[in-house]
């Protein structure tokens, strides 16, 4: 009789734990986590799945990763609130907030301990060029026309130094940061614009930093404006708690090896980039 009583108590405790434990059910509508297409969709899903699983555990709600077809489509989706969570490039966020208004920011990446990143104008180590003004009459390599760090930022840096693209002997768009680094290394261009990460990768092969940009706020995570405020608060808390969670390093480095944490994000953090984009692309300033 005593054994039956113990079994009954244990069963009651297990039932209680089952009923009160947070769990993901099929009835809960998944949160749609949209990512801009900066890599092939299969690669992005692989990189961001650990983060999605972490958020599911924290929120007790399913999270589905979705990849948009283009950068502009991603900007429009976020601007029209056709998402729940979004990962954006810094310039895409600035363009989106300018066109549609600001959205709730959840966090931003921290790379090597800093929630900012830098652009570099690079030359070969044996180049006689010593400052940005020396680039008049020289050739210059940009990356993609829509790239923050391989076009908008270096173009801004040139303009601040009094050098327009019309002062260059020639300039070309090589599509990627790596192509820019290789083009300068090979002597096809006198200088080029890349992000700091790519400069570090190729520095020992013969590159030198000519100039470094002001700090630019890192890639943000954004929430839909119409999400419940309590859910936005929980999401923000979950992102920032990655810094102290045992799962944090694996989740963070899955996105990119150099990611070391998450930092708080405010709309004002992107004002420097707004100035860069405004000056760097302002009509008439290259005359």
Image (tube, grey):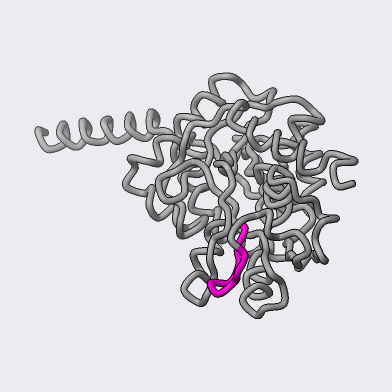
Residue 241 in percent (x, y) is at 39, 36
How many circles with numbers are drawn on the protein? 0
Residue 218 in percent (x, y) is at 56, 43
In the image, what residue occupies the spot 53% across and 66% down? 208
In the image, what residue occupies the spot 50% across and 48% down? 51
Which image quarter: residue 5? top left
Residue 64 versus residue 207: which sits nearer the camera? 207
Residue 52 versus residue 181: which sits nearer the camera? 181
In the image, what residue occupies the spot 47% across and 44% down? 110
Quadrant containing the N terminus in the rendered view: top left
Residue 35 in percent (x, y) is at 66, 48
Left or right: 54 in relation to 225: left
From this viewpoint, is residue 36 visible? no
Q: Is residue 219 magenta?
A: no
> Which residue extends farthest bottom?
186
Above or below residue 199? Residue 49 is above
Residue 83 in percent (x, y) is at 71, 37
In the image, what residue occupies the spot 26% across and 31% down? 13
Q: Is residue 124 magenta?
A: yes
What residue range appears in magenta?
121-129
> Which residue extends farthest left?
2
Residue 118 versus residue 244: which sits nearer the camera? 118
> Which residue extends farthest top?
229
Left or right: 285 in relation to 127: right
From this viewpoint, is residue 188 visible? yes
């Amino acid at each position: 009789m005593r054994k039956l009583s113990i079994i009954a108590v244990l069963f009651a405790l297990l039932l209680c734990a089952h009923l009160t434990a947070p769990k993901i059910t099929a009835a809960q509508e998944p949160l749609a986590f949209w990512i801009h297409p900066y890599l092939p969709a299969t690669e992005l899903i692989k990189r961001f799945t650990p983060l999605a699983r972490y958020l599911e555990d924290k929120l007790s709600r399913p999270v589905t990763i979705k990849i948009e077809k283009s950068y502009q489509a991603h900007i429009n989706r976020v601007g029209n609130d056709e998402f729940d969570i979004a990962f954006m490039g810094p310039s895409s966020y600035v363009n989106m907030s300018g066109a549609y208004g600001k959205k709730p920011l959840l966090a931003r990446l921290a790379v090597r301990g800093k929630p900012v990143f830098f652009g570099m104008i690079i030359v070969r180590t044996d180049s006689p060029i010593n400052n940005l003004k020396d680039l008049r009459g020289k050739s210059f390599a940009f990356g993609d026309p829509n790239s923050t760090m391989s076009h908008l930022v270096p173009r801004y840096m040139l303009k601040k130094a009094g050098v327009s693209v019309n002062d260059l002997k020639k300039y070309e768009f090589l599509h990627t940061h790596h192509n820019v680094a290789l083009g300068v290394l090979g002597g096809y261009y006198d200088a080029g614009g890349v992000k700091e990460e790519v400069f570090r990768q190729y520095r020992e092969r013969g590159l030198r930093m000519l100039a470094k940009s002001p700090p630019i706020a890192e890639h943000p995570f954004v929430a839909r404006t119409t999400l419940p405020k309590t859910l936005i608060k929980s999401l923000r808390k979950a992102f920032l708690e990655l810094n102290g969670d045992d799962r944090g390093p694996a989740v963070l480095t899955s996105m990119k090896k150099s990611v070391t944490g998450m930092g708080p994000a405010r709309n004002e953090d992107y004002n420097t980039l707004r100035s860069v984009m405004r000056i760097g692309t302002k009509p008439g300033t290259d005359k």
